[in-house]
Image (cartoon, grey):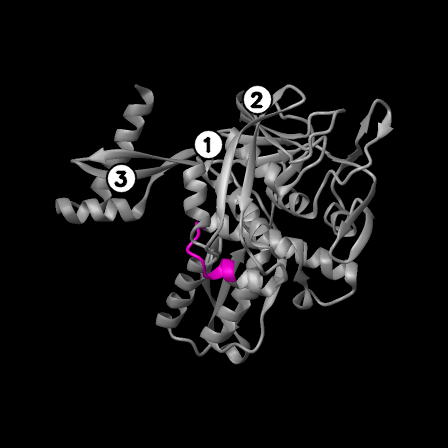
Amino acid sequence: MSALWVNPAVGVAGDMLLAALLDAGADPEAVRATVAELPVPGWSLDAGPTTRRGLTATSVVVTAPDGVHHRSWSTIDAMLAAADLPGPVRDGARATFERLARAEAHVHGIDVDEVHFHEVGAIDAIVDVVGTWAALHDLGDPRVTSAPVGLGIGTVRMAHGTVPVPAPATLELLEGHPTAPLTVDGRPVERETATPTGVALLTTMAAAWGPLPAGTIRGVGRGAGTWDPAGHANVVTVVRYEPADEAGADRWPAASVEAVVVETNVDDVTPEVLGHVISLALELGADDAWVLPVTMKKSRPGHQVRVLCRPALVPAVRRLLATETGTLGLREWAVTKHELERRTTKVLVDGHTVGIKVGPYGAKPEHDDVAAAARALDRPLRDVADEALAAFRARRSG
């Protein structure tokens, strides 16, 4: 099962992360095709080899003749929600921009819905964010661990004027995460080494922080920043590795994924509507959704509708439950979600392809594939599922 370790020891920016993932093996054409689903025409994404202080790396350049640099968070969020993006890409990009928006709102003392992005609102920044999540998705959505972020000092010119480095929003985003001062020859680097976009991406992507975990290295990528100082190689390094699987080790990850449960009780909604709500929640990108029978006040039979989702999706889930069920109230709370590594492979059953979802403790045929094969072959569903699983086990043992 693949995993990814990021080393931002000399800093991090959105274009550096994207370049590092491309250098590590993500397909540039797949990334471009994913970003092309956004309603923002006219951009181009070029990636190519370069060097920084003798180290080979990849650099990316996003060209976008965009006259609009001030986009609100709600505008960008709506754009991402409406785009035909893979679920992990859409959710990751939305969570990144929401994290940025909340940081900006806290810095400027305004409500999050009033946040207007300046540099981050430009098309090149949007392409960097969505492109980075698309590259991570192309690499198989690996679990990400990050080393501490290297920070410079000084000042930087931004839309609001000259501000200290690290920038205020960057510091907000880094709250609770490890950092280290960036020094060269014992002296601090007087430069913005970590940008708000890069830090927002990294803190959203990383499930854990620390040194390179134990495992087998499968690949290395380096992403170059536009700055090429004389004192150090300005690159972000990513390492693809296979985690060590020690005998008897607990395969449940020590780190968790932030998630939220949103629920409501209803006693006047038909089963047809409840099923529709579940389908819509999953289409939105929810991790899971389900309905439980409950006994409500006055001993009325009713249903409890629950949706498990990432924090960035909560506003959309609230709207869905309210509009589709007519409920007058919701409850929600943060939960700890542990995700086991998984992959998908395929087998053939009498010429029909069936996907097999494989985890550390077992494997299961994909129901839709089994059902399609069973219909085409005019065979019982259970027989086709059993044969698919047997084919997978035979191939694995062979």
Q: Which mark is residue 317?
A: none
Query: Separation of disc 1 and disc 3 at Cα?
Result: 20 Å
Mark 3 and mark 2 in contact? Answer it, CB < 8 Å. no
Q: What is the three-letter code of the residue carrying label 3? A: Val
- Residue drawn at x 59%, y 53% is 95
State the quadrant of the C terminus. Answer: top left
Residue appearing at x 38%, y 66% in the figure:
275
Q: Which residue is mark 3?
A: 354
Can the viewer see residue 181? yes
Dot 3: element: strand
In this image, 373 relative to 362: left or right? left
Residue 285 covered by magenta stretch: no
Which is nearer the N-term, disc 1 or disc 3? 3
* Residue named by callout 1: 360
Q: Position of residue 51 (x, y in %)?
A: 61, 24
Q: Earlier in the sequence, mark 2 or mark 1?
A: 2
Q: Is residue 325 left or right of residue 66?
A: left
Kindly identify which residue carries mark 2.
Answer: 215
* Residue stretch in magenta: 79-86
At label 3, counting other C-alpha atoms closer than 10 Å, the crowd grade (few under 14, some 14-19, many 20 or more) is many
The answer for how far apart the CA atoms under marks 2 and 1 are is: 16 Å
Element type at mark 2: strand
Q: Looking at the picture, how far across and down is residue 159, in whole percent?
A: 73, 56
